[in-house]
Amino acid sequence: MSDRCILRHLRRLVTTALIAALAIAPAFAADDSNEAWKALVEGGHVALIRHGNAPGPSLGAGGDPPGFRIGDCRTQRNLDETGRGEAKALGEAFRSHGVRVDRIQSSPWCRCMETAQLMAVGPVETSSALAPSTDRNPNAPAALRALRETISNWRGPGTLVLVTHGFTVRALTGIVPGQAETVVLKPTPGGASGAHVVGWIAASH
């Protein structure tokens, strides 16, 4: 087979895969939100939340401008009014569904901390394990191991809320959520992944 034929074949495979993904993903998000809320109300589950809308350049590690500093919000991407509204609406959705939050942890990045604080579902702790999991982060493998252990060991009785970045959610679950979206996990002690996905909740507005 010539190189040109191989390239055509690969393009067809990629196109087919993309069509399949586009057909499945919306159904997954829509069909599983009820199951996700049900699991959170039951307790003993984990809500893995990507921070709210945070526009701006994303050229450096974790989607921040080059030279950003974790302790200086002025150097980072931050929530805009849309993102703040999403965070508040998400917290209200937790309360209206009757979700008991026993613990809430956040990446130390400002947009995650602000999302967690504006949800107003409990005192916010910071965790370096929730930092962006990228190849530019030399601590990412160890952080992911610690995060998987935290998730797999969670017993409740309420919900563990983890506010983090899209990179980290993808590394844990293979899912790339939109900003302010929630992936609900059921802990699986002893499993390689530490949890399995129960459902997906779209951003609240």
Image (spheres, helix red, strand yellow):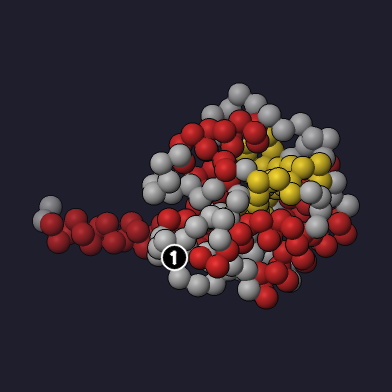
**Where residue 4 sits: x, y (%)?**
14, 61
Total numbered labels placed on residues in the image? 1
Q: For residue 36, say whether it is visible.
A: yes
Looking at the picture, tell me which residue is in the foreground, 193 or 85. 85
Q: Nearer the viewer, residue 144 or 33?
A: 144
Q: Position of residue 1 (x, y in %)?
A: 12, 52
Q: Residues within 10 Å of mark 1 (few under 14, many from 20)?
A: some
Compared to residue 28, the image places residue 85 above or below, namely below
In this view of the protein, can residue 188 be seen by the observer?
no
The amino acid at mark 1 is Pro
155 relative to 136 in the view: left or right: right
Q: Which residue: 57% across, 33% down?
A: 146
**In x, y percent, where is residue 30?**
68, 61
Q: Quadrant of the C terminus?
A: bottom right
Badge 1 is on which residue? 65
On the rendered structure, is 2 left or right of 148? Answer: left
What residue is at 11 percent from the left and 56 percent from the top?
2
- In the image, is residue 83 above or below residue 2? below
